[in-house]
Image: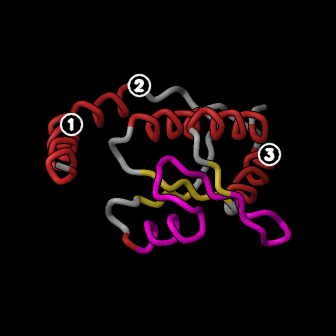
Amino acid sequence: MRIVIRLFFKLLRRILMPFMLIYAAVSKPKPIEREQQAQAEVEAQCRQLTLYQYTTCPFCIKVKKEIHRLALPISMANVLRDQNARDELESKGGQVKVPCLKIVENDGSEQWMYESEEIKKYLQQRFAA
């Protein structure tokens, strides 16, 4: 039964994929503009962030739209295509669930944030002008 359910959702994802990709491309908001020095500081801070996601996840699309709106160069790790990213998400983050924002603090400690609304709120608080 579990295999049938997985196959159903895999098929559904394949059918909806083109529509999700079109929606993601068409609905991108206009990015904010910062002064060059401020943008350089933001880019330096974004080196400590990684978004674990997959392309057609609607919650990931919501977070990526906010990342685009805030003009954040956050690195992306696709857990469906990159087995190492999936393994790291499972071993260090505790579960294979996307979207997940990995935040590396200045002292080297890591925080794993899983909920899309929580991720958006964190990014807005940290990077909004």
Q: Name the residue under label 3.
A: 38
Q: Vertical placement of 85 versus 21: above or below?
A: below
Give residue 105's position: percent from left, percent from top: 79, 63
**Separation of marks 1 and 3 at Cα, in angstroms:** 36 Å
Return the mark for residue 18: 1
Is 99 included in the stretch rendered in magenta? yes
Q: How far apart are marks 1 and 2 (CA)?
A: 14 Å
Q: Is residue 50 left or right of residue 121?
A: left
Residue at left 18%, top 38%?
12
In this picture, which residue range is highlighted in magenta? 84-111
- Nearer the observer, 4 or 99: 4
Q: Quadrant of the C terminus?
A: top right
Name the N-terminal-most of marks 2 and 3: 2
Which image quadrant is residue 124 in? top right
Q: Which of marks 1 and 2 is nearer the N terminus?
A: 1
Categorize mark 2 by other alpha carbons within 10 Å: few (<14), some (14-19), many (20+).
few
Q: Nearer the viewer, mark 2 or mark 3?
A: 2
Q: Farthest residue in the right direction? A: 107
Q: Which mark is residue 89?
A: none
Q: Which amino acid does label 1 sit on?
A: Pro
State the residue position of label 2.
27
Local secondary structure at mark 1: helix
Q: Where is residue 113 in the image (x, y as percent from the top left)?
A: 64, 49
Say which label, 1 or 3, has the lower sequence index.
Answer: 1
